[in-house]
Image: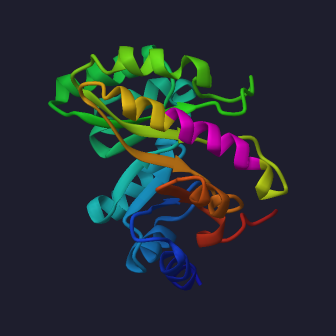
């Protein structure tokens, strides 16, 4: 079923769009099945789960961190963790960016990052507020061992995917504004927006990276 799900999604996605398989709480065997079907990027929310999966899967795919660094700071900023991940999609503060830069300097790595935008301005969620994004990007761009590669947003959760459109549209606007500034060492290449329920809307608003979990792996089993 996982292979079939992946193939259906890949067939409908435009060629320029990257698929991130959100593997939260998924078994390594399920992740391997998704990779066998064509998934090239695995997204992990939790460092511990990522490490366990990586022991089995290894470098058969790229690994993106899509969780909240602040809540896992102790484990997230370990050298072995940063060696494992190929991109961090959820940088939203100078503090985290500087810490990643320092650790990556020690291991001789430049970490590609996306700046997370709190497009819904929700106090309970991570992400930099839209109006503060440019200043943060300018500051982080001076770091040598992280490289800003674009933006990411979650947006508020709605039952109707169409209600997410204004938040995706605002994030795309910021994306284009930063691109026009043409900051040194900043490459506005990826716009990561949309999940299982909203990725069609996100694509229509300019996303070129989508994070899909449930539509690949199925619903989480209920006890």
Residue 27 shown left or right of residue 106 in the figure: right
For the question of whether residue 166 can be seen, the reply is: yes
Q: Position of residue 171 (x, y in %)?
A: 58, 38
Residue at image point 46% right, 73% down = 34
> Which of the pair 39/24 is nearer the observer?
39
Residue 128 figure quarter:
top right
Q: Work out which residue is located at the far front of the displayed protein and give it.
A: 180
Q: Position of residue 156 (x, y in %)?
A: 75, 41
Location of the C terminus (image quadrant)? bottom right
- Where residue 58 appears, as percent x and y from the top left, is 30, 59
In the image, residue 222 above or below residue 49: below
Relative to the observer, which residue lies in front, 42 or 159? 159
- 120 is higher (above) or lower (below) than 93: below
Q: Residue furthest right?
A: 159
Q: Nearer the viewer, residue 55 or 24?
A: 24
For the stretch drawn in magenta, the main secondary structure is: helix
Q: Report if residue 151 lies within the magenta region.
A: no
Instruction: Report the magenta residues as a range.
Output: 164-174
Horizontal arrangement in the rendering, residue 175 relative to residue 113 (left or right)? right
Could you tell me which residue is drawn at 36 percent across and 63 percent down? 56
Question: Considering the image in quadrants, where does the N terminus appear?
Answer: bottom right
* Colour mode of the rendering: rainbow
Q: Residue furthest left?
A: 108
The number of callouts visible is 0
Image quarter for residue 60? bottom left
* Whether residue 67 can be seen here: no
Residue occupying the point 43% across, 80% down: 37
- Quadrant for residue 99, please give it: top left
């Amino acid at each position: 079923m996982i292979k079939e799900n992946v193939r259906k999604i890949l067939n409908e996605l435009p060629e320029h769009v990257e698929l991130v398989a959100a593997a939260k709480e998924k078994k390594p065997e399920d992740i391997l099945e998704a990779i066998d079907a064509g998934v090239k990027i695995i997204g992990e929310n939790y460092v511990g789960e990522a490490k366990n999966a990586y022991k089995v899967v290894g470098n058969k795919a790229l690994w993106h961190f899509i969780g909240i660094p602040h809540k896992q700071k102790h484990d997230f900023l370990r050298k072995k963790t940063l060696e494992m991940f190929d991109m961090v999609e959820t940088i939203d503060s100078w503090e985290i960016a500087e810490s990643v830069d320092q650790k990556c300097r020690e291991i001789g790595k430049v970490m590609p990052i996306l700046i997370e935008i709190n497009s819904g301005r929700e106090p309970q969620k991570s992400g930099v507020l839209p109006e503060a994004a440019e200043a943060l990007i300018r500051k982080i761009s001076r770091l040598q061992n992280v490289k800003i590669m674009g933006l990411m947003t979650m947006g508020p959760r709605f039952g109707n995917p169409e209600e997410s459109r204004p938040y995706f549209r605002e994030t795309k606007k910021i994306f284009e504004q930063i691109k026009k500034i043409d900051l040194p060492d900043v490459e506005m290449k990826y716009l990561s927006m949309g999940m299982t329920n909203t990725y069609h809307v996100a694509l229509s608003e300019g996303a070129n990276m989508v994070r899909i979990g449930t539509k690949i792996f199925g619903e989480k089993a209920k006890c």
